[in-house]
Amino acid sequence: MGVDKSEKSCPLPDTTDFVISGNNNIKTTSPSLQRFASGKISLVYASSLKTNPVNQIFQSVLKSTGEVVVNTQAVNSLKSTHEVNYNHYLIPDQDSVGVTWQSETNGPSSDRIFFKIYNDMGKNITPEVTVNPSNYPSNRAEYNPTTVISTDGKKMAISWVEKNTTENYDTIKLQYFKTQNGERIMGSAVTVSQKENCYFYYLKSIQLLDQGIAIVWISKCNTKDNADVDELNLIIYDWDGKNVSGLIPIGAKQQILHSQPDLAANVHEKNFFVIWETENNNIISISGAAFNFKGSLIKSIEHVNENLNNQIENIFPIIKSIGKNENAFYVIVWNYITKSNMDHNLHGKIYNSKIQEIGSEFKVNQNIKGEQDQPTLVATGALVEKKNVLYPEFLISWSSIEHDSNLKGIFSRVFLSDSTPLSDEFKINTQIEESQYSPVMVSTPNSKTGSNDFFIAWYNVDLASNQEIFGKQLKFTKIKMNVIIEKQQIQEGDYWDFSLHDNTFNCEKQDIQVEATLKDDNKLPEWLKWDQDLWRFAGTVPYNVATYTIVLNAKDPCENILQYTFDLQVTKASKKSSFHWSLFLGILIPGLVIFAVTIASVMYLRTKKIKTGYKEIIQNQAISSNFSDTQSYSSSNQFFQIEDDKL
């Protein structure tokens, strides 16, 4: 008996979405969100003029509701004539965010890497820093920057691909920075990889706590017979720039596709999971490999996806680590395109922190029309207990591209980390005729409900091809139940009542509907009434020894239900208590009152008569003053005798 320990979430999107930034003269794309410790949100996005392919990065600060606190400001001072790649990351020690990007300095073949740091008021607390020296040869171009911040926020590692525009090779560079007196000081520089006739793509990096950073990338090398060989590589560096793992090839070298790597880490088990897309014998699949923080292989997975024969490609697989400690899981989501009808769906697979499969491959979207693309996911913060295991919830959002206005837009759905769907898919945006792309999300704790709310941003394309950044707050009702039954054993004939206190649930009463029934029936016994408005039981127990198992069902607007069950035991009335004192006293007390009033009345009347007799004696003595004493005494005795007789 007791309360279900689950904490189930119910998403409640705001009724309207709103424009965050943009105008008719620019094209905004690639939004990114980070949350400050203060709860404010940093928004970064790229934009370009319609009439001139000049790219620039902008940043603004929002409230958790999306309201603009600091208006849009340009990040990069040097505009670029081609697409600008950037990172947007949180720096915990200063409650700040950083932006790393590439920009041209003197033409398309002379890109440089820069970064800036902003606080939650939008102030640039670290001016624009050039990562790579300005005296680089003119035949160098830098792109694909990635940034990793240490746990304490005091160290920074920026890696990027340097392309030699006149020679046949690429180089991966790594530059360290450390905080000294509040300033970012440049530290050691490392050449990670350089090989003739080899080109590097899809560079990714991740923090491994105090161990350092892990970097993965795809190498595409030309052999003597002019055939391309793809290889996925991994390397681990500590925070001082020391190579602690050596170069680790992942998977077999293939003369076919290797692409789209992604990785995530679990700090409790101190392992990380790398996934990538590969093709072998005309079968396209997602492969994976897990390593400990020192680079030792834990497990290799040839096929993450189970449906191998009916798909033509997996686009942009992503992996996220959700939950904490022993309740942490890896969630993988990818775009699944079927050969038969070219449907674009989203599929997923879940592993626990020990790289063990949890359930089977599952489908994310319910709408089967259009192209489901660009998934992003984040944990809701809720845990649901199943068979003594606490599974974290997560929210997936994606873009649906379709001609039907009801089926296109930004959609979301809530899942449990055992792949169980906890909601139907629901639409985020309210625009009907326009198109929406690249959703991103960030969680914002809600102190009133104790749960996480979310802010979702995307870029919107209207019918005139204007591109703007839109956003919306997504609130969650997360039911938590705390019931204390003070009296669970009563005797026959007793009156029993019980009210749920206002703190039973962590949400407002209007958001929760509570129903009470017997466990094996859909109603309560006739003697016991439940008041839904007052959350109160009341009733007089019949003379019948029994045990009533009562079930409380708490339901939120999404039909999620929490249950609390308890036994109400009715015991036989004891002999000592068989005499009904309440009935006895109900008769005795009125009787005693009547008796007392009667006695008081009699005494009052008697006293009154005695006083009257004395008055008459005095009067008779005055009138008959000539009588003898003996006569007077006799008359008096006669009077009293008469009065006594009357009495």
Image (cartoon, rainbow, N blue to C red):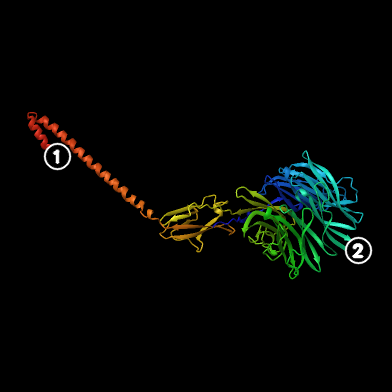
- Residue 565 locus on image (x, y percent): 53, 58
Q: Secondary structure at mark 1?
A: helix
Q: Residue at x 67, y 57 (%)?
A: 395
In the rendered image, the residue lying farthest to the front is 575
Quadrant housing the C terminus: top left
Please, what is the three-letter code of the amino acid marked with disc 1?
A: Glu
Q: Residue at x 20, y 40 (%)?
A: 606
Please, what is the three-letter code of the amino acid marked with disc 2?
A: Asn
Q: Nearer the viewer, residue 357 or 59?
A: 357
Q: Is residue 397 left or right of residue 560?
A: right
Quadrant housing the N terminus: bottom right
Q: Quadrant of residue 618?
A: top left
Which numbered marker is on residue 643? 1
- Residue 102 locus on image (x, y percent): 82, 50
Q: Quadrant of residue 575?
A: bottom left
- Residue 253 locus on image (x, y percent): 84, 62
Q: Secondary structure at mark 2?
A: loop
* Label 1 CA crowd tier, 10 Å (few <14, some 14–19, many 20+): few
Q: Nearer the viewer, residue 182 or 634?
A: 634
Which numbered marker is on residue 226? 2
Residue 483 seen in the current view: yes
